Amino acid sequence: MNEYLLSFLIAIGINLGFFAFAAILKTDKFTDFTYGLSFIILALVLLINNGTFFGFQIILAIMVSLWGIRLVSYLLVRILKIKKDSRFDGIRENFFSFLKFWLLQGFSVWAIMLPSIFLFTQKDMFSFNSTMYLGVAIWIIGLLIESIADQQKFVFKNNPKNEGLWIETGIWKYSRHPNYFGEMLTWWGIFVYAIPQLSGLSWLTIVGPLFITSLLLFVSGIPLLEKKYNEKYKNNQKYQEYKKRTSLLIPLPNKLAS
């Protein structure tokens, strides 16, 4: 079976499997957990299925898995604490709307993984070069930014003194959505890691990082949160000042954000 089709079926299958439990129990506890887990499972299945176990493929599997484990751990702790994700209000009760979300999540995993799928299916060994090292460096920076941002926000939100407030300390002082910036960097790093082997149609795997970037910038990430905060703090002068002086995405010194 074509590896891209196999990967698509695996990603959709994992999400449909967990959707069944989520729909029956009408719970949000499986959604984000399944998202991160799908990447880990897909990476390991592709590595084992190809059977070559080249060094660059093992490193790639570690990169994808570490990102997934970190995300799964964080999101699982978060949903167990908050119990319910308000994003699914009015959706989890509607079978087809809920199913649509899970199918889109499965497709998203597959699309984001396109550069990784390409590398996992290579049959020839090749040596590391400066471009691949650059890709790993970008991935590490992205993982650190995303991890630090999530941890800072989690601690802030779980402090009763901060109830009803927005975070503008730590890395959040320089970006309103640093966690999303970090996530984008991890997948651009993996694409850069794949560049030395790209040629012809394989360059289309750039769809992966473009997809997650577009998703977070224009669809499910930043737009939803910006709308939520704009409505919640529309009459709050301090929030308006924070928004004006702070970069939307890329962490920048405040004086450069505007």
Image: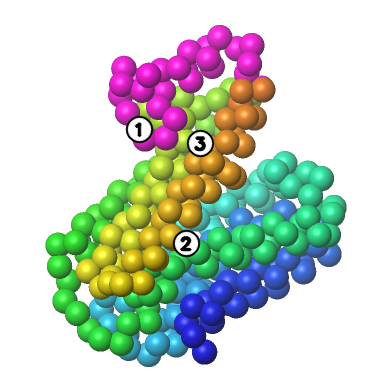
Up-down relation of residue 53 to residue 41 (above or below) = below
Provide residue 147's location: percent of width, then percent of height: 42, 47
Q: Is residue 239 magenta?
A: yes
Chain-order first, disc 3 or disc 1? 3
Instruction: For mark 2, give the secondary structure.
Output: helix
Rendered image quadrant of residue 236: top right
Neighbour tally class for label 3: few under 14, some 14-19, many 20 plus, Cα within 10 Å = some
The residue stretch that appears in magenta: 232-258
Q: Nearer the viewer, mark 2 or mark 3?
A: 2
Mark sitting on residue 153: 3
Q: How many marks?
A: 3
What residue is disc 2 on? Answer: 112
Left or right? Give the position of 138 relative to 120: left
Q: Nearer the viewer, mark 3 or mark 1?
A: 1
Residue type at the position of mark 2: Ile
**Residue 224 visible in the current orientation:** yes
What residue is disc 1 on? Answer: 251
